[in-house]
Amino acid sequence: MATQVIGIEQGRLDTSSGDTLERRVADALAAGASEVAVSCGTLALVDSSGLGSLVRSLKRCRAQGVSFKLLDVTKPLLRLLEMTRLASAFEMEHSSRSGAKTSV
């Protein structure tokens, strides 16, 4: 199987949506994905639980030798990753949009 792209619904990554993300990553790995990509272009909010879900998903993929990347990384998400010194841990493709104006 090739790349599995996972979208984040409702523009937020928090406890509830983070759990969903982790389940979807596990499903993609079980299906044999060679790469997991998370589409972040609609994210208006990422809390500490959501950030933890991204880190756990990254670790899970790496443990299985599968590439994990963030797509359409918006400026607010990039700032959060930089402030927490996690930006260098993730492979990212940046968006040209500011990101914070998405309807939820």
Image (cartoon, rainbow, N blue to C red):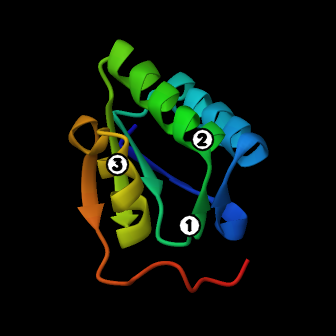
Which residue does the numbered mark 2 point to in the structure image?
Answer: 48
Q: CA distance from mark 2 to mark 3?
A: 12 Å
Residue 10 against residue 91 in the figure, above or below: below
Query: Do labels 3 and 1 touch, CB within 8 Å?
Result: no
Please report whichever mark, 1 or 2, sits nearer to the chain's N-terminal start. Answer: 1
Which residue does the numbered mark 3 point to in the structure image?
Answer: 83
Q: Is residue 88 left or right of residue 83?
A: left
The disc labelled 3 sits on which kind of residue?
Met
Q: Residue at x 55, y 23 (%)?
A: 30
Secondary element at image label 2:
helix
Q: Residue at x 62, y 49 (%)?
A: 47
Is 99 or 92 nearer to us in this picture?
99
Q: Is residue 103 left or right of residue 42?
A: right
Q: Position of residue 82 (x, y in %)?
A: 29, 50
Q: Residue 30 got which mark?
A: none
Q: Residue furthest front?
A: 83
Which residue does the numbered mark 1 point to in the structure image?
Answer: 43
Is 30 or 24 nearer to us in this picture?
24
The disc labelled 1 sits on which kind of residue?
Leu
Residue 89 against residue 26 in the figure, above or below: below
The disc labelled 2 sits on which kind of residue?
Ser
Task: Examine the image and state in which quarter residue 64 appears.
Answer: top left
